[in-house]
C-alpha cells in the first residue's frame, strides 16, 4: 500500500520523487508549523514538526508523530485521517483543510523514509555545471527544464518587439519610430548587442532602475502620518540614480545605504546614501511620545532590511517568534540593536559650488569687519575717545566669572559631554520632559549668582543651541524650571535676567509654532529667564535655534553660597515638544552686581579685570555694539547668520562609542513593555558575524554580502529576474522562507546568484546577461498548448506579457507625444493632476501648484510624492505610496485605468501635443495614422489595424471634429490601447 501511494504521487509529479523542500515543507508550513513550529508560546504538545529529532521522537502523549517508512504507525497520518474532531489535525476551529493531494504527499514522503532537508534558501548557493554546452547559460537551464516537461522554446520575437522590449526594460521608455527603425534596419550580427550596450550606458538607465529601488526604500517627499509635512530627502533619490548609472557594485551600493557614515573617510555622497533608512515615516501629531515613534521607525527598518536584502519576513517577529520560519522573537531585537545606535541629523551637502560660496562669504564678512573702523563718525580720534568711555562705563557693569565644570552630570535621557572650553555638549535621545542634574563643586565661597551661557554648535539641529529636532522650533530649547539645591535643601533664587529677555520672536505656550503676537495682552507670561523660577511648566526661558546664536541667563541667589560642599543644579525642560539644552557653559561669580550684560564671556572677563593688553579684542567688540555703527553692524550680523548652506537632506550618523543606545526586547512588540536588554547580533539560524568584527551597522552591512550568507545574492538575482519576466524564479520576492514557493528553476537561480558575485556585484552585467539570452528574446505569443500547460509562463517557454508600471506608462506617453523633459535630478515636481487630490482629505490646506516649463513634463521618478495623498495617476496604476517597503507591486485591471488614460489632464495634453506634431510631420491621413500608432506601439500598424483606425477617424469626423481636435481624439484612442501599456 505504501509503495502504491509513492507511485501515485510520482505519477502526479511528472515522474519526480517527493522532494521535502518542494513538496513536503510547504504543506507542513501551511498547516502545521503555526502550532508545531518555532514559536514556543504557541507550540502545542511540545511537538515540533520543523525539526527532525522532535518529529521522529516521542511527543507529550508518548506517540511518535512520524515513523520513517511506516505510514500506519505515524501519528501525523492518523490525525490527518481521523473522523474524531477532538483528534483531527489541523483542528476544525483553525479552518485549515489539508487537501487529498497534500495528504498523499505526506504519506508518500513518510513511506520513502521521511527524510528532512535544510530549507533550500538557507543553504549557500552553488554554481552547478551547465546542463547543456554551447548555449547561453540561462538558455541551458531553461531549455533543460522545457525538455523534461515536453515543451519547446518559442521562436525569437520580431525586431520591432525586441527593440521596444529592450527600451522599456532597460531605460523605462519606448523607442521613437526613428530609433526603432535604426535597429530594425541594422543587419550587422552584433546589432542587438550594440543596442543593449548603448541603453545600459544611457543616463535614463539609472532613472528606470532607481524607481524600482525606491519601492523598497519606501521613498516619499513627505513625513507621513496625520500632518504629512514635506521633507528634504530628494538628494538621496538622485544619489540612487547616479550610483546605478555608474554601475556601483551592488555590495557597495547597499553598504553605503546601511552604514555609509561609518566607512573610513566617508564622503558627502556616503552620508547622503544613508537616506535609505531615513525614509521612515515621522509622526508630528500633538501629544505623541517621540521616542515611541522612533522605536516604531526602528521596527520598520528591521523589516525593510529583512525584505530588501534577505527575503525574510522579519516584521513577523516584532511581537513573537516566527510561526513558520526559524526566526526568534529575540532575533528581531538583536537585529534591531545592530541598527539602533545611530542619530538622525539633517545634513547640508557641501558641494564644490557651496564650498566656493562659503569661502567668498567668509572673505566678505572679514572685509565687513575690517571696514567697521572706517565707518565710525569722526574717524580714529572719535573712535578712541568713545572706546575709552565705553570701557570705563562697562567695567563697572562687568563681573568676574569663573567657569565651573560639573563634577557630576546626570540626565533622564540625553548624553552630556564636557568639552575642553568648559562648554557641555548634548546629544542622543530626548523626551518631552528631560531633567539635567549637574553637581557643581569648587573651593569658592560667597557665590552670588550662576550664569548659563548658551551658544550654537554645528552638531545640533539647526545649529542649536537646543536639541529640539521636530514638532517645536528646530535647534531651540525651553528651560521650564531652574533650581539649585545644597544638602537636599532648595537655595532661594530671587530673580533671573537673560540677554534675550526683550526679544519678541519667541514661541508662546498658547501659540506654539507661531511668532509671538505683538497685540497679545501684557499680562500673558513671557518666556524669559525669570519664568524658569515660577514653578509653572507652561512658562520658562526659551532660545530659538540658528547660526551664531549666543545668549546667557544669570540666576541670582538670595544669600551667598559656598560651593565647597557642592551645589546641585536641576534644569527641567518640559513642553509639548522635546526641548532640552544642547550646548551650554556654567559660570559662577562672587560679584554683588552681576547681570546679563550681553558681552561675550571673554570680553566681560577683560572688562572686569581691566586688562589693557586685550585692547584689540575690546575694540573689536565695541565696534560691533556702538550705536554709531548700528546699520553696518546689523548688516554684518545678518551676513553672519546667513552663511551659504548646502542642500539639506536626511542622513544617519553613528553615535559616539561612549554613548551607545541600549536595546531591549519588547513584549508583544509594544513600546510600553520593554523587557531584558538584547545585545546586537544577526539572526541565530544564519552564519554569525566574524568574531573580530564589532557588532554594529557597518559589520552587519558587510555580513549581508559575506560568501557564507545564503540569502542576499539569491534574493537580489531573483528580484532582477522578475523585472524582466514579470515573475521571479521564486514568486515571492519578499519571502524566501518556508511559506514561499520553491524556485521554478533552482539551479538557474543559484547559478545567477554566484555569477552576480563573480562579476563583482555588477547590476549592468547581470542585466546584460539576462537580455542577451534566447529565453528573453522569445516571442510572447501564447499557443493553445502553452495556455493549457503553462498559462503563467513559469517554465519560460515564451516571452512574458504584463502591464507596464505606472511611471513607465506615463513617461511613455510623454515621450510618444514628444514633450518629455530630459532634465534630471532636483526637488520633486508637480505635474498636472486633479486639484482635489491634495485639497480634500488631507491635513490643512495643501495646494498642488502645477509645475510649469520643463518641470511640467518631467519623468515620473521626479514627481513629488505626498504619502497621504499620492499622485492620482500613479496609484490608479498600482504605484506605492511610500508608506512601506514594497518588493513587488500588485497589478490590477480596472475601468478607472482606461478612464485615466482617456481623460486625465496630463494624457489629454500629451494627446494634443502629439496631434500637433503628427499634423506637422505627416501630409496625409494614412501617414498620420501610422505615425501615431508607431509612437505608441513602436511597430507599424498592419492593414486591418489601419482600416479600424480609419473607421474611427471617419466616425469622429461625423461628430463634427476636425483639425487638431480630430487628431487629438485619435491620439487618445491609440494611447489607450492595451499594446501601448503592455510589456511586449
Image (spheres, helix red, strand yellow):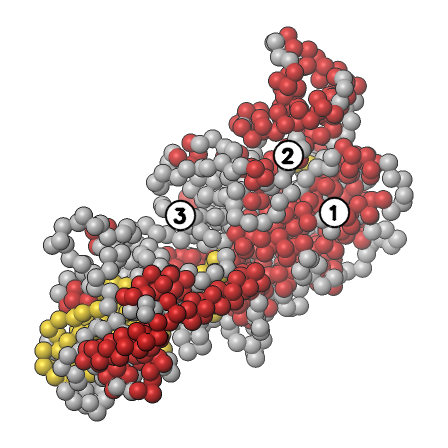
Front: mark 1 or 2 = 2
CA separation in Å, label 3 and label 2: 31 Å
Residue 903: % across, % down: 55, 24
> Which residue position is annotated with label 3?
229
Q: CA distance from mark 1 to mark 2?
A: 20 Å
454 or 540: nearer the viewer: 454
Look at the picture and state if 628 lies above or below 146. below
In this view, the residue farthest toward the right is 188
Neighbours of disc 3 within 10 Å: few (<14), some (14-19), many (20+): some
Q: Is residue 866 visible?
A: yes
Say what secondary structure mark 2 lies in: loop
Q: CA distance from mark 3 to mark 1?
A: 37 Å
Give the residue drawn at x 45%, y 37%: 848
Secondary element at tag 3: loop
Q: Image point 73% across, 51% down: which residue?
A: 201
Of the image marks 3 and 2, the number of the one nearer the N terminus: 3
Q: Position of residue 121 (x, y in %)?
A: 63, 58
- Is disc 1 placed on a helix, strand or loop? helix
Q: Residue furthest bottom?
A: 443
> Quick one: label 1 or label 2, which is nearer the N terminus?
1
In this picture, residue 481 sits left or right of residue 689:
left
Q: Residue placed at 27% from the left, 77% from the top?
A: 385
Tell whether 384 sits left or right of 27: left
Which label belongs to residue 199? 1
Q: Which residue is mark 2?
A: 819
Amino acid at each position: 500500500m505504501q509503495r502504491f501511494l509513492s507511485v501515485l504521487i510520482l505519477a502526479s509529479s511528472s515522474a519526480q520523487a517527493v522532494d521535502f523542500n518542494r513538496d513536503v515543507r510547504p504543506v507542513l508550513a501551511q498547516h502545521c508549523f503555526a502550532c508545531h513550529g518555532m514559536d514556543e508560546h504557541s507550540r502545542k504538545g511540545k511537538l515540533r514538526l520543523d525539526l527532525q529529532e522532535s518529529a521522529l521522537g516521542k511527543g507529550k502523549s508518548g506517540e511518535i508523530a512520524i515513523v520513517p517508512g511506516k505510514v500506519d504507525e505515524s501519528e501525523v497520518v492518523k490525525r490527518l485521517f481521523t473522523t474524531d474532531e477532538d483528534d483531527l489535525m489541523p483542528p476544525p476551529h483553525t479552518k485549515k483543510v489539508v487537501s487529498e493531494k497534500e495528504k498523499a504527499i505526506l504519506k508518500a514522503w513518510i513511506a520513502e523514509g521521511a527524510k528532512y532537508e535544510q530549507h533550500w534558501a538557507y543553504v549557500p548557493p552553488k554554481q552547478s555545471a551547465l546542463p547543456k554546452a554551447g548555449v547561453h547559460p540561462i538558455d541551458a537551464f531553461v531549455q533543460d527544464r522545457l525538455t523534461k516537461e515536453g515543451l519547446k522554446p518559442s521562436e525569437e520575437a520580431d525586431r520591432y518587439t525586441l527593440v521596444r522590449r529592450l527600451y522599456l526594460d532597460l531605460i523605462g521608455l519606448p523607442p521613437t519610430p526613428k530609433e526603432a527603425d535604426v535597429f530594425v534596419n541594422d543587419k550587422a550580427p552584433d546589432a542587438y548587442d550594440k543596442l543593449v550596450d548603448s541603453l545600459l550606458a544611457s543616463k535614463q538607465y539609472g532613472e528606470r532602475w532607481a524607481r524600482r529601488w525606491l519601492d523598497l526604500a519606501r521613498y516619499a517627499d513627505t513625513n507621513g502620518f496625520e500632518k504629512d509635512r514635506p521633507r528634504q530627502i530628494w538628494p538621496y533619490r538622485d544619489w540612487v540614480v547616479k550610483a546605478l548609472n555608474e554601475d556601483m557594485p551592488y555590495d557597495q551600493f547597499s553598504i553605503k545605504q546601511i552604514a555609509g557614515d561609518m566607512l573610513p573617510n566617508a564622503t558627502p555622497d556616503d552620508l547622503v546614501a544613508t537616506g535609505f533608512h531615513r525614509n521612515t515615516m515621522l509622526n508630528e501629531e500633538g501629544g505623541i511620545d517621540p521616542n515611541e515613534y522612533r522605536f516604531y521607525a526602528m521596527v520598520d527598518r528591521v523589516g525593510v532590511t529583512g525584505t530588501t536584502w534577505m527575503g525574510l519576513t522579519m516584521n513577523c517577529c516584532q511581537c513573537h517568534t516566527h510561526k513558520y520560519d526559524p526566526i526568534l522573537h529575540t532575533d528581531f531585537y538583536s537585529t534591531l540593536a545592530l541598527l539602533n545606535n545611530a542619530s538622525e541629523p539633517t545634513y547640508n551637502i557641501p558641494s564644490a559650488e557651496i564650498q566656493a560660496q562659503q569661502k567668498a562669504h567668509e572673505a566678505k564678512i572679514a572685509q565687513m569687519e575690517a571696514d567697521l573702523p572706517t565707518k565710525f563718525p569722526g574717524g580714529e580720534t572719535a573712535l578712541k575717545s568713545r572706546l575709552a568711555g565705553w570701557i570705563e562705563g562697562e567695567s563697572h557693569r562687568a563681573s568676574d566669572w569663573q567657569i565651573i565644570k560639573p563634577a557630576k552630570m546626570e540626565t533622564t535621557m540625553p548624553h552630556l559631554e564636557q568639552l575642553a572650553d568648559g562648554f557641555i555638549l548634548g546629544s542622543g535621545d530626548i523626551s518631552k520632559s528631560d531633567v539635567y542634574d549637574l553637581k557643581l563643586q569648587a573651593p569658592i565661597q560667597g557665590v552670588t549668582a550662576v550664569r548659563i551661557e548658551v551658544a550654537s554648535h554645528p552638531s545640533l539641529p539647526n545649529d542649536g543651541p537646543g536639541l529640539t529636532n521636530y514638532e517645536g522650533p528646530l535647534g531651540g530649547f525651553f528651560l521650564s524650571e531652574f533650581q539649585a539645591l545644597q544638602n537636599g535643601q532648595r537655595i532661594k533664587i530671587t530673580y533671573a535676567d537673560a540677554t534675550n529677555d526683550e526679544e519678541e520672536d519667541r514661541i508662546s505656550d498658547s501659540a506654539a509654532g507661531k511668532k509671538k503676537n505683538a497685540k497679545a495682552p501684557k499680562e500673558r507670561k513671557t518666556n524669559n529667564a525669570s519664568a524658569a523660577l515660577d514653578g509653572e511648566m507652561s512658562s520658562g526661558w526659551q532660545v530659538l535655534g540658528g547660526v551664531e546664536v549666543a545668549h546667557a541667563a544669570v540666576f541670582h541667589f538670595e544669600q551667598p553660597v559656598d560651593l565647597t560642599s557642592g551645589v546641585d543644579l536641576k534644569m527641567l525642560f518640559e513642553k509639548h515638544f522635546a526641548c532640552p539644552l544642547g550646548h551650554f557653559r556654567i559660570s559662577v561669580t562672587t560679584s554683588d552686581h552681576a547681570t546679563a550684560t550681553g558681552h561675550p564671556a571673554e570680553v566681560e572677563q577683560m572688562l572686569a579685570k581691566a586688562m589693557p593688553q586685550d585692547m584689540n579684542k575690546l575694540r573689536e567688540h565695541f565696534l560691533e555694539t556702538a550705536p554709531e555703527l548700528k546699520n553696518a553692524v546689523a548688516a554684518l550680523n545678518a551676513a553672519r547668520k546667513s552663511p551659504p548652506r548646502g542642500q539639506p537632506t536626511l542622513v544617519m550618523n553613528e553615535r559616539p562609542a561612549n554613548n551607545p543606545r541600549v536595546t531591549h526586547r519588547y513584549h508583544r512588540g509594544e513600546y510600553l513593555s520593554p523587557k531584558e536588554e538584547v545585545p546586537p547580533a544577526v539572526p541565530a539560524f544564519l552564519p554569525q558575524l566574524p568574531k573580530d568584527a564589532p557588532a554594529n551597522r557597518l559589520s552587519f552591512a558587510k555580513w549581508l554580502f559575506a560568501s557564507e550568507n545564503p540569502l542576499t545574492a539569491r534574493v537580489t538575482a531573483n528580484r532582477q529576474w522578475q523585472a524582466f519576466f514579470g515573475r521571479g524564479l521564486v514568486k515571492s520576492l519578499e519571502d524566501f522562507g518556508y511559506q514561499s514557493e520553491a524556485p521554478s528553476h533552482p539551479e538557474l537561480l543559484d547559478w545567477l546568484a554566484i555569477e552576480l558575485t563573480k562579476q563583482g556585484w555588477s547590476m549592468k552585467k547581470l542585466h546584460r546577461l539576462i537580455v542577451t539570452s534566447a529565453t528573453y528574446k522569445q516571442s510572447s505569443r501564447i499557443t493553445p498548448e502553452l495556455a493549457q500547460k503553462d498559462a503563467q509562463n513559469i517554465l519560460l517557454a515564451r516571452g512574458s506579457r504584463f502591464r507596464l508600471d505606472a511611471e513607465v506608462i506615463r513617461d511613455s506617453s510623454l515621450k510618444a507625444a514628444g514633450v518629455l523633459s530630459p532634465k534630471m535630478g532636483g526637488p520633486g515636481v508637480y505635474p498636472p493632476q486633479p486639484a482635489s487630490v491634495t485639497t480634500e482629505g488631507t491635513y490643512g490646506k495643501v495646494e498642488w501648484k502645477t509645475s510649469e516649463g520643463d518641470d511640467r513634463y518631467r519623468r515620473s521618478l521626479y514627481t513629488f510624492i505626498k504619502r497621504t495623498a499620492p499622485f492620482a495617476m500613479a496609484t490608479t496604476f498600482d504605484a506605492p505610496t511610500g508608506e512601506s517597503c514594497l518588493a513587488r507591486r500588485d497589478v490590477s485591471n480596472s475601468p478607472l485605468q482606461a478612464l485615466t488614460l482617456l481623460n486625465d489632464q496630463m494624457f489629454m495634453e500629451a494627446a494634443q501635443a502629439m496631434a500637433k506634431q503628427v499634423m506637422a510631420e505627416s501630409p496625409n491621413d494614412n501617414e498620420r495614422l501610422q505615425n501615431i500608432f508607431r509612437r505608441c506601439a513602436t511597430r507599424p500598424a498592419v492593414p486591418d489595424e489601419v482600416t479600424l483606425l480609419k473607421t474611427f477617424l471617419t466616425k469622429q469626423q461625423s461628430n463634427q471634429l476636425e483639425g487638431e481636435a480630430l487628431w487629438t481624439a485619435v491620439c487618445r484612442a491609440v494611447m489607450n490601447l492595451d499594446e501601448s501599456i503592455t510589456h511586449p
